[in-house]
Image (tube, rainbow, N blue to C red):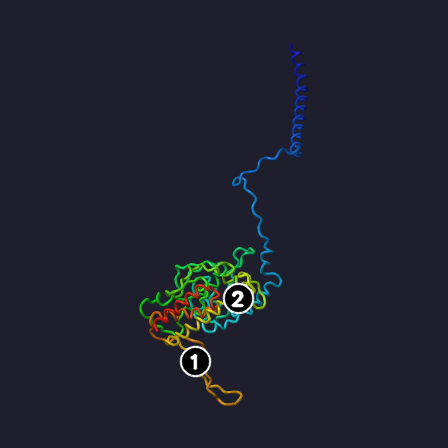
């Protein structure tokens, strides 16, 4: 029995070794299969359904080509053309404003490039400007905001709160920048100092030298009662985009009009009115208004409210070699004094509409109502 047992044990060990070798080989083969399985990709299965926006996201909108949007303004000759047009503008010269008011803090926000930029950035001009200069590209155009083709990069483009009454707000689109300066700086006399009389203390009294946006919008003058009713403020057709400041004064440049000359473009007016006029006297508006302005001026002269500015200077006559007295006239200005309120209102309307310089073209119905009713009221007091 003992011998048989030993025999069995002796034969068991080789069998175990063989089994272990077979197991190792099997494991090796399984590993190879796993490696090949991971390394190879079978045919694609069917596509799954689209993800839900907000969970798996959705495709974004393609951005605007940066080069294209920059070239809207900065193309080869585009900027140069704009500069050439601007050189024809009185804004580029500056003599109409910078020389006498560009440095004063109270005036600089509109009368110099430095003042306008400071006002646009800070809402005020803190101190006098030592070396004021005329307007240039960067005066109106600041840093870009959207970098898109519609981005004109205007420093001021919010709706206007009129200075004469901040509760009166007008949105003139791109023309808001123009309206910041071209508006009345004060309300009419019966609003600032209501009463039976009004005292004019300065030869510079009046709305301002360019209250065009007030005329265009139809508000801010002395709306004296009379035979002609006043149109609703802001209701003039010229408050539409084509009739506002940029629509008429910056239409396609041609022959010294439009573009960055800011000179009114006759082509813009003719296009809107469907006519082929050779001047801005559409429907005889300017002829009528010019006559009314002269009639009102003469009434004010007769009442002593205004007088013609006269300056007498002795100068050398180059032809005769003799020093002679030369008389220069510089328009009309108010005479300091106290006047019945109707006369002060009449002067305010006359000088404001005279210095609007459109002869009614900006807002015919409003201008005709102001002049007709003012002349009637003033004549009734004579």
Say whether residue 132 is left or right of residue 21.
left
Quarter of image, res 5: top right
In this picture, residue 329 sits left or right of residue 278: left
Instruction: Decide: is 4 above or below 133.
Output: above
Question: Viewed as shown, does residue 115 lie left or right of 41?
Answer: left
Q: Nearer the viewer, residue 354 or 302?
A: 302
Residue 351 picture location, percent across and down: 42, 71
Q: What distance separates the C-alpha of mark 2 from that of mark 1?
A: 32 Å
Please give left or right for residue 148 compared with residue 43 in the image.
Answer: left
Q: Position of residue 103 (x, y in %)?
A: 45, 71
Determine which residue is flagged by label 1: 310
State which quarter of the image contains the N terminus.
Answer: top right
The foreground one among 287 and 163 is 287
Q: Quadrant of residue 166?
A: bottom left
Q: In terms of sequence position, does the residue under pointer 2 or pointer 1 come before the other?
A: 2
Mark 2, residue position: 264
Secondary structure category for the residue under label 1: strand
């Amino acid at each position: 029995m003992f011998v048989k047992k030993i025999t069995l044990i002796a034969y068991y060990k080789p069998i175990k070794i063989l089994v272990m070798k077979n197991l190792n080989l099997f494991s090796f083969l399984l590993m190879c299969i796993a490696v090949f399985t991971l390394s190879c990709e079978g045919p694609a299965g069917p596509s799954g359904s689209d993800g839900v926006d907000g969970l798996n996201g959705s495709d974004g909108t393609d951005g605007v080509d940066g080069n294209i949007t920059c070239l809207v303004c900065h193309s080869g000759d585009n900027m140069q053309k704009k500069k050439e047009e601007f050189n024809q503008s009185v804004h580029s010269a500056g003599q109409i404003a910078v020389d006498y008011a560009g440095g004063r803090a109270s005036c600089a926000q509109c009368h110099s490039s430095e003042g306008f930029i400071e006002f646009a950035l800070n809402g005020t001009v803190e101190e006098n400007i030592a070396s004021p200069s005329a307007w240039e590209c960067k005066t109106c155009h600041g840093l870009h905001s959207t970098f898109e083709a519609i981005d004109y990069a205007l420093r001021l483009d919010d709706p206007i709160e009129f200075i004469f009454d901040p509760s009166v707000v007008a949105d003139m689109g791109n023309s808001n920048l123009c309206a910041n300066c071209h508006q009345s700086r004060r309300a009419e006399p019966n609003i600032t100092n209501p009463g039976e009389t009004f005292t004019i203390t300065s030869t510079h009294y009046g709305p301002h030298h360019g209250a065009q946006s007030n005329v265009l919008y139809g508000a801010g003058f002395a709306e004296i009662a009379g035979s002609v009713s006043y149109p609703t403020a802001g209701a003039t057709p010229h408050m539409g985009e084509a009739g506002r400041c940029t629509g008429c004064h910056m239409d396609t440049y041609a022959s010294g009009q439009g573009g960055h000359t800011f000179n009114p473009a006759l082509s813009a007016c003719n296009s809107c009115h469907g006519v082929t006029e050779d001047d801005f006297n559409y429907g005889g508006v300017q002829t009528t208004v010019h006559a009314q302005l002269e009639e009102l001026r003469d009434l004010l002269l007769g009442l002593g409210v205004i007088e013609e500015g006269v300056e007498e200077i002795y100068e050398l006559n180059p032809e005769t070699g003799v020093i002679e007295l030369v008389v220069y006239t510089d328009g009309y200005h108010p005479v300091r004094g106290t006047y019945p309120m109707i006369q002060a209102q009449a002067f305010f309307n006359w000088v404001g509409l005279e210095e609007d310089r459109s002869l009614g073209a900006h807002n015919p119905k409003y201008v005709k109502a102001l002049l007709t009713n003012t002349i009637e009221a003033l004549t009734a007091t004579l």
